[in-house]
Image (cartoon, rainbow, N blue to C red):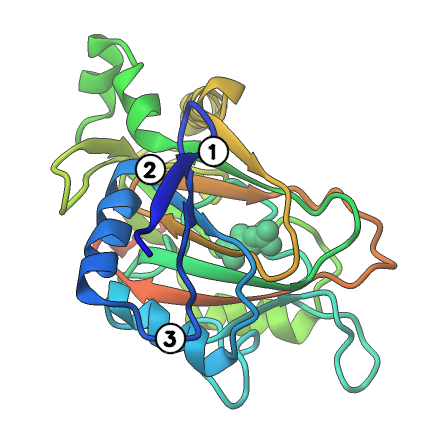
Amino acid sequence: MAIECRPLSFALGAEILGLDLHFPISDSDWESVHQAFLQYGVLLIRGQSISREQHIAFSRRFGDLDEHKSLPMDRNATFPELLMVTNDQKPDGSPSNSRYTGQMWHSDMSFTLAPALGSLLRAVEVPPVGGDTLFANMYVAYDALSERMKQMIEGLNGIHHSERKNSGLSTSWEKENQRLNPPVAQPVVRVHPETGRKALYIGEKVKCFEGMTPEESKPLIDFLVGHATRPHFVYRHSWQPKDLLIWDNRCTAHLALGDYDPRYRRHLERTTVLGTPSGHIAEIGAAA
Ligand SMILES: O=C(O)CCC(=O)C(=O)O
């Protein structure tokens, strides 16, 4: 059966119909999926009650997978390619450290020297309502800037931190996270290696621009994040169990809203496709 592609919003995203990921995907189907991935930035494949092995096998079509060495505290003990995004308590009864994953606008692994190419997030169990995820199209956000603003930000580097928004994570998690992930400077404008288009690469994990103080940087960071995440540029995903959502981190940013009743289980698992090396460890001096 030929696969079909149905746009999810004006800004970005498409649902792919006619794929069953229990089976390896043919080369011609892969070609269609890859083209849709480049065109829409976010792909949704519903109704996939696949195993962890099948999730990993399909993800490998996109490229080499991250083994999440920068987040060992959150990865699955048996499958290092799987990052847990869950509010399940830990075996000792303490709260999960990944329950707040993604609650700031970000692009995956921007705080590392190998920021993610793509991510494939599979919903195992989700609350009956809420727990939505927002995606912004960073190409159109870039294109919509004035020429003067484009000139101003060309050559700027944003310093990306790995912290999570909500406090209340265990101190050992926070310490390990800081030890493994020193801040990394990344270009604010990146050229997508496959499409050749420019996209904004900014989010709430950027605390300042390299060579500028946080006070000097903040107004421009706030403007760029606010601009890029205007409703016009955004798709809001309401999860169903067995959804597989795939996004291109090189031209989109996303935010887990956390808009749900925490008495319900929310358990998702993510593979992360390694991107090309980018950025450098930031020199944190007086002006950073
Ligand atoms: O939980 C979500 O909805 C998104 C999680 C997230 O931001 C991520 O995996 O990068």
Q: Residue 191, which numbered label?
A: none
Label 1 crowding class (10 Å Cα cut-off): few <14, some 14-19, many 20+? Answer: some
Secondary structure under tag 2 reads: helix
Q: Which residue is mark 3?
A: 23
Where is residue 59 shown, x and y percent of the image? 35, 68
Q: Residue at x 43, y 60 (%)?
A: 120
Where is residue 37 shown, x and y percent of the image? 30, 46
Q: Residue at x 41, y 25 (%)?
A: 11
Q: Which residue is mark 2?
A: 40
Label 3 crowding class (10 Å Cα cut-off): few <14, some 14-19, many 20+? Answer: few
The residue at label 3 has a CB less than 8 Å from ligand 1:
no
Check the picture and name the quadrant holding the N terminus. Answer: bottom left
The kind of residue tagged 1 is Leu
Q: Is residue 256 visible?
A: yes
Which sits in the foreground, 285 or 239?
Answer: 239
**Residues tagged 2 and 1 counted as in contact (Cβ below 8 A):** yes
Label 2 crowding class (10 Å Cα cut-off): few <14, some 14-19, many 20+? Answer: many
Secondary structure under tag 1 reads: loop
Q: Is residue 276 visible?
A: no
Which sits in the foreground, 265 or 186?
Answer: 265
Q: CA distance from mark 2 to mark 3?
A: 24 Å
Q: Residue furthest right?
A: 263
The residue at label 2 has a CB less than 8 Å from ligand 1:
no
Which-is-in-front pick, marks 1 and 3? 3
Q: Which residue is mark 1?
A: 8
The residue at label 1 has a CB less than 8 Å from ligand 1:
no
Q: CA distance from mark 2 to mark 1?
A: 9 Å
Secondary structure under tag 3 reads: loop
Which sits in the foreground, 27 or 94?
Answer: 27
